[in-house]
């Protein structure tokens, strides 16, 4: 895992200055070494900071030049099947054991398109073709590794993190549309970024820039992994000749075993949920490897799930590491969190992700995660709500649902919560009436918009635009859009920045494209059946862990953000919201005041919005 960046420019002096500063800014992504490569004409410069995982020798040093001298690469990520792929060119004399060399020589032998379809892994890389004088940027199928690009004056810049742009002492204009996305979704979706003229490379894509096109800024984008096409070709196709859970278990085991490739210690996050538990179970029981597992807990028992992780760890006999954070710990960490991210980002689960990455790094360099299990196998509560209530609500006019939702959303949360508690109804997973309203109206209205083709119209047209999603039910459509948008732009962004801030590499066994494609073939009722989610995963897990240990309602990986903002960090929060120093031209201070007062008086819980404002303003002052 590494940090990559580079510049295509006509100024030699500028390149040298950029090289020194870009590598310094990205050192947390690669503390084990750094490198710089210049073209002979000095118009192309690649930078690299290295977190050494495979082949710790100098044979893995980057930027790396191919044996033919045609290609230069700066690569971030892991190619899990790279040793198997070396057999495709048996006559080649390898210099070392790094996956970077494998990738580079595969491209030299087979070209970029064929190579991207052969490799399995998470990656973002920049490739310079000396013969054709062009730059290629590529990103993995699901967007596990980040890659930004854009134009600064007459220079083309690419980078793992937008933080490197802080070095540019020129005005960077904020994109107001991106800011609107942020306040609606807590993150900014690809290909947008917070800045004008800078973009995220979309998952499953690569772009090509001829260096002669710097002035015209002409870029070609190509999609090598089209998920709409994959959905069309795989959804609910009949599966024959094998037991579905057994085959999925084999795929998962193979993916996990491939991801154990490392010359540094490997462990796993263990939250006690289904996804992380199945990863640890297959490693410990089926593959016979004792591993280090990591979890965090909180003194606030309403948010503490460490006891469940501890039970599973004990049953699997893992080398378990647990840390319980108190309120003072959290209070000291929250103000730092927005600075970890490149652009405004405020999914509050970023805080526990930061914490578990911090404790894991003290023991390992690589950690496996359960990311992707919910999106592929139907794990979210909103899927249950949509599946259960959509047939009824679909009979109600769209406008009427909005009116009812707004009425619910503006009532006193405290009043309704107390009444529900008196009659024995406890909102275990949905903690407030507003959350209930949000889950019902937002997610169900989303399904309604999908049926109206509003989402279809927002995505660039291709051959699979009209026919690819029509065969899916409403929940399956939501799962598809979560894989396309929520997974890369929120969850994977969160994990990448939090882990790499601590120089920790994370790997997600569920995000193997073979597993994704197989998940589309599984009948819907083996994912969600009545009030049960992830049916097929639970079937596999029950072979290794008693159901009584892992079966319980799903809880989010979060902290009581409202409690901290309005109590322990009250004065700090108010200073960022109301001091003139933090005011900005995009937000109406009267509305900000209203959000605070409504939440402070328990009339509405707008703490998520308030956290997004605070995160944005801290980021804005630090950019």
Image: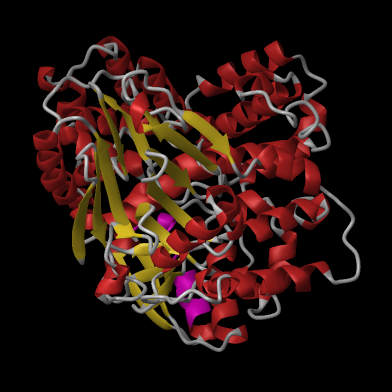
**Is residue 397 found left or right of 182 in the rendered image?**
right
Residue 369 magenta: no
- Along the line of sight, the residue nearer the viewer: 619 or 335: 619
- Residue 324 appears in which quarter of the rendering? bottom left
Q: Is residue 299 visible?
A: no
Q: Is residue 48 above or below residue 215?
A: below
- Along the line of sight, the residue nearer the viewer: 250 or 43: 43
Q: Residue at x 36, y 48 (%)?
A: 350
Q: Residue at x 40, y 63 (%)?
A: 100
**Is residue 97 found left or right of 425 in the rendered image?**
left
**Is residue 523 found left or right of 85 in the rendered image?**
right
Q: Position of residue 142 (x, y in %)?
A: 54, 48
- Residue 266 appears in which quarter of the rendering? bottom left
Q: Residue at x 31, y 21 (%)?
A: 597
Q: Position of residue 113 (x, y in %)?
A: 58, 48
Q: Is residue 190 visible?
A: yes
Residue 301 magenta: yes
Quadrant (top left/top right/bottom left/bottom right) for the C terminus? top left
- Along the line of sight, the residue nearer the viewer: 329 or 409: 329
Q: Is residue 247 above or below residue 143?
A: below
Tell me which secondary structure the magenta stretch mostly adopts. Answer: helix
- Residue 592 appears in which quarter of the rendering? top left
Q: Is residue 271 above or below residue 192?
A: below
- The magenta-colored residue range is 300-313
Q: Position of residue 106 (x, y in %)?
A: 51, 61
**What colouring method underlies this structural image?**
secondary structure
Q: Position of residue 101 (x, y in %)?
A: 40, 66
């Amino acid at each position: 895992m590494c940090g990559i960046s580079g510049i295509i420019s006509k100024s030699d002096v500028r390149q040298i200055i950029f090289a020194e500063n870009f590598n310094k800014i990205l050192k947390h992504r690669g503390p084990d070494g750094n490198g710089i490569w210049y073209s002979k004409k000095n118009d192309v410069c690649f930078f690299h900071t290295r977190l050494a995982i495979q082949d710790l020798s100098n044979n893995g040093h980057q930027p790396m030049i191919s044996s033919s001298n045609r290609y230069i690469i700066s690569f971030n990520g892991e190619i899990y099947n790279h040793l198997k792929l070396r057999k495709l060119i048996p006559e080649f004399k390898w210099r070392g054991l790094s996956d970077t060399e494998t990738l580079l020589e595969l491209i030299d032998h087979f070209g970029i398109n064929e190579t991207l379809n052969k490799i399995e892994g998470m990656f973002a890389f920049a490739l310079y073709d000396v013969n054709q004088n062009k730059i290629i940027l590529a990103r993995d199928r699901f967007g596990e590794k980040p890659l930004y690009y854009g134009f600064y004056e007459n220079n083309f810049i690419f980078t793992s993190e937008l933080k490197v742009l802080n070095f540019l002492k020129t005005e960077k204009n904020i994109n107001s549309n991106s800011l609107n996305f942020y306040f609606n979704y807590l993150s900014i979706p690809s290909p947008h970024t917070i800045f004008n003229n800078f973009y995220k490379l979309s998952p499953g894509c690569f772009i090509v820039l001829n260096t002669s096109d710097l002035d015209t800024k002409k870029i070609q984008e190509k999609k090598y992994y089209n998920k709409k096409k994959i959905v069309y070709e795989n959804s609910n196709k009949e599966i024959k000749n094998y037991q579905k859970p057994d085959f999925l278990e084999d795929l998962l085991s193979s993916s996990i075993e491939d991801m154990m490739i490392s010359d540094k210690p490997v462990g796993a996050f263990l939250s006690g949920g289904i996804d992380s538990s199945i990863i640890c179970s297959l490693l410990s029981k089926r593959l016979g490897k004792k591993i280090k597992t990591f979890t965090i807990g909180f003194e606030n028992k309403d948010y503490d799930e460490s006891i469940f992780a501890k039970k599973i760890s004990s049953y699997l006999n893992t080398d378990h590491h647990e840390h319980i954070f108190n309120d003072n710990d959290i209070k000291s960490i929250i103000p730092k969190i927005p600075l970890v991210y490149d652009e405004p980002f405020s999914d509050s689960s970023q805080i526990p992700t930061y914490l578990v990455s911090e404790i894991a790094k003290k023991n390992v360099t690589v950690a496996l995660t359960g990311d992707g299990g919910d999106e592929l196998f139907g794990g979210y509560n909103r899927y249950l709500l949509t599946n259960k209530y959509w047939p009824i609500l679909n009979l109600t006019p769209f406008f009427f649902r909005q009116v009812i939702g707004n009425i619910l959303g503006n009532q006193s949360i405290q009043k309704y919560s107390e009444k529900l508690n008196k009659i024995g109804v406890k909102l275990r997973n949905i903690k407030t009436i507003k959350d209930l309203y949000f889950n019902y109206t937002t997610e169900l209205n989303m399904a309604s918009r999908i049926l109206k083709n509003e989402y279809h119209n927002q995505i660039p047209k291709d051959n699979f635009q009209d026919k690819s999603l029509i065969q899916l039910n409403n929940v399956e459509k939501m799962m598809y859009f979560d894989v396309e948008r929520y997974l890369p732009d929120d969850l994977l962004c969160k994990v990448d920045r939090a882990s790499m801030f601590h120089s920790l590499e994370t790997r997600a066994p569920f995000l193997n494209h073979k597993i994704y494609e197989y998940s589309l073939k599984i009948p819907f009722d083996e994912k969600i059946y009545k009030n049960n989610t992830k049916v097929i995963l639970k079937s596999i897990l029950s072979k290794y862990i008693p159901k009584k240990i892992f079966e319980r309602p799903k809880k989010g990986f979060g902290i009581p953000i409202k409690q901290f903002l309005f109590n322990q960090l009250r004065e700090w929060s108010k200073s960022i919201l109301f001091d003139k120093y933090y005011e900005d031209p995009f937000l109406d201070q009267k509305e900000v005041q209203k959000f605070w007062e409504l939440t402070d008086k328990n009339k509405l819980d707008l703490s998520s919005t308030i956290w997004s404002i605070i995160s944005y303003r801290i980021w804005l002052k630090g950019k």
